[in-house]
Amino acid sequence: MVTQFDEKKQNERLDELRRKEEEQLAQMLAGKYGVGYVDLTSKSIDTDALRLIPEKEARETETAAFKKVNKKILVAMRAPERDNALQTIQNIEGLGYTVEKYMCSRASLEHAWDRYHDISYATETEAGVLTLSNETIQRMLAELKTLDDVRNQIKEHVASKDTHRISHALEITMAGALSLGASDIHLEPEEERVRMRYRLDGVLVEVTMFDFPTYTLISSRLKLLSGLKLNIKNAAQDGRFSIVVNEKEIEIRASVLPGAYAETIVMRVLDPTTIALPFEQLGFDKYLMEIFEREIQKPNGMILNTGPTGSGKTTTLYAFLGRVTTPEIKVVTIEDPIEYHLAGIVQTQVSKDYTFASGLRSTLRQDPDVIMVGEIRDAEVASTAVHASLTGHLVFSTLHTNDAAGTFPRLIDMGVNADILGAAVTVAMAQRLVRRLCPICRVATPLTAEHHAVLDPLLNNIPHKDELPANQETMWLPKGCEKCGGLGYKGRVACVEVVLMDREIEATVRTTSSERDIWAAAKHQHIRRMAQDGAVKVLQGVTSLDELSRVVDLHDEVMLETIA
């Protein structure tokens, strides 16, 4: 009987033999290079780890990240000595991970690479990290210059039949927000469609519209990314995730509310580069810079910055901290959340079990010289902060009041003894942010009688007239160009007012809580009111009169009375 030759089985045996030989070789080389060995064909691949190396890069460098354990990443490779493979390892380490290297065969890598088909291009993860490759983000930052660029690209991808169209749209949404400097992203369902808006320099601007099927997919991705429950649609949820861009982590805080038509989502973009302003770039006039320079160098006391949410209070306090921090002093902060990491200081973040009150008490046991409390929210925090300032500490904090003079009655309402405010508080300031006119496209226009009617009461008795521009008959209007994204404004600057603690203010606070009386007592300090500070910026061409009027009440009776 003649045995029939089976070519297929023979080839299968040869392939199996070659594979075993390759695995043996990889195992031997692992010992030579002093790394581990792994056969990935029998292992499940962790896609959270896999997406840390883009597919193209993984194939070019013959690497694959196959497992993630906390902040440790296991990476398989064929040639541990290869330069591009080593560069890939360095890139992962630059994201804050520890890398454990393994030798493997080509078959192992092919098995891992096959899993790229199971994950989206935008690489959203259950761990709450959205990773945009350096190549991708650089390309997008170059392409997404204006709102129209963002609109067109989102519409293009949503309309496509690409299986990853939602991931692409989400990627563009995030990259567009970073490129244009948006502080928030709003997704607002209406009866027939869903509106998406960016908050740019404090103003909401419409970007695009989504149909409900598309929005359902987007909201599910965002909820998954933020660590929120997909099946809960009738209750508010808060979550967070981060975007890793160019080895920099940007935190995104997500808020979901049930609405009449569907859930509305707002994402706060906490980009540290937007608040990392040095002291000299805050936009304060020279006389204010001199005041702040003197006051923040004092060894004790309390400096309070007041204003509504989004008025730049934290940015100003960060700049103050950056100015006073030296190797000779200890600085501790209590924040919610930590928005920017400062070198040389201890930063803590509030949580369910670590509140501003408990954090401040604990901080005082850390032997600090300077303390920053993110916000004075209640009587306990107010009392402890005042105590800290009276016991040799310099305290920075924020408070919600309408103006600087309102700081003192607000603290008294919280239970602080009016008799000790004079010794505790050194500076009360208030600020609002106005949009800066784009210096490239702003247009000059002469002041009309109507403009003079608004500005003249603010300028007639204004302190420090020497800092006013020579031309006081011209202001500027927004136009729009490519540099400012067609909006006519780019960036923001603070309009500020200050009340310094002195004998007159101390005596007034002890006898009355009237803000009118406090402002009258502060008149001798020759510090501009917020509206006056804004009027100067209008004449300087920093902002427009319409923009100032949007943010600051230029007709406030108490203000006009106390500056007359």
Image (tube, rainbow, N blue to C red):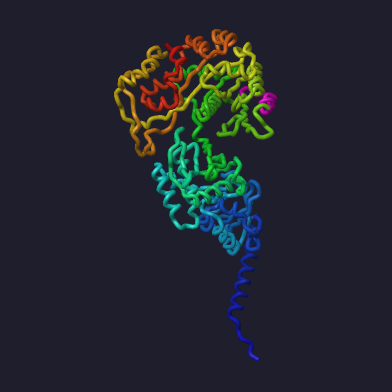
Q: Is residue 529 visible?
A: yes
Is residue 311 shown above or below 217?
Answer: above
Most distant residue in the bottom direction: 1
Is residue 505 shown above or below 451?
Answer: above
- To which quarter of the image does residue 560 belong? top left
Which quadrant is the N terminus positioned in? bottom right
Image coordinates for residue 347, horizontal then vertical, percent: 62, 31
- Confirm whether the magenta stretch covers residue 94: no
| Numbered label tally | 0
Depth check: 446 or 369 in front?
446
Q: Is residue 327 visible?
A: no
Which quadrant is the C terminus positioned in? top left
Q: In this view, does 473 lie to the left or right of 288?
A: left
Which residue appears at 59% of the width and 28% of the height? 374
Image coordinates for residue 159, horizontal then vertical, percent: 43, 54
Which residue appears at 53% of the width and 54% of the height? 120
Image coordinates for residue 103, horizontal then vertical, percent: 62, 58
Where are the magenta residues, as a range? 358-370
Is residue 445 shown above or below 81?
Answer: above
Depth check: 491 or 205 in front?
205
Image coordinates for residue 409, horizontal then vertical, percent: 58, 16
Q: Is residue 561 left or right of residue 412?
A: left
- Confirm whether the magenta stretch covers residue 369: yes
